[in-house]
Amino acid sequence: MKKKTLFWILGIVIVTLVVLVGGKKAGMFGKTKRGKEVEIAKITPIDITRNSCCYRKNTARGRSCTFF
């Protein structure tokens, strides 16, 4: 085998490996797990009402309401 042929074969193998590794990291080959899996849920609106202690200045324990 000539030296020139050996360099061509070695060059093609190296280029192929670089393309395959780059493609794998880019997500072109195989499944890649980037990020975290999250659950998607539908949001339903609700009404939030204040506790009765918040309407009074002091609660039963003598402290003011800490919500507002």
Image (cartoon, grey):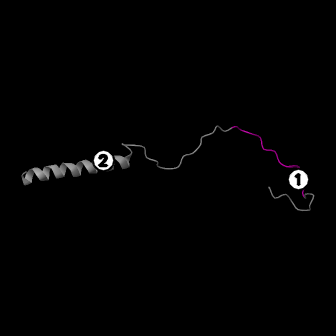
Percent x, y of residue 23: 33, 46
Q: Residue at position x 81%, y 45% from top?
A: 49
Label 1 with label 2: CB-CB less than 8 Å: no
> Residue 44 at what x, y percent from top left?
69, 37
Provide the major secondary structure of the magenta segment. Answer: loop
For the point 54% across and 46% down, the residue is 37
As measured in the structure, the alpha-carbon distance from the residue carrying label 1 to the one carrying label 2 is 66 Å
- Is-magenta flag for residue 45? yes
Quickly name the residue at label 1: 53
At 22% from the left and 52% from the top, the residue drawn is: 14
Quarter of the image with the C terminus is bottom right
The kind of secondary structure element at disc 2 is helix
Give the side of residue 11 with respect to residue 63, left or right. Answer: left
Locate residue 18, reporting x and y percent. 27, 51
Q: Position of residue 64 (x, y in %)?
A: 87, 60
Residue at image point 60% right, 40% down:
40
Residue placed furthest toward the bottom = 62
Segment colored magenta: 44-57
Indicate which disc residue 20 carries. Answer: 2
Residue type at numbered disc 1: Cys
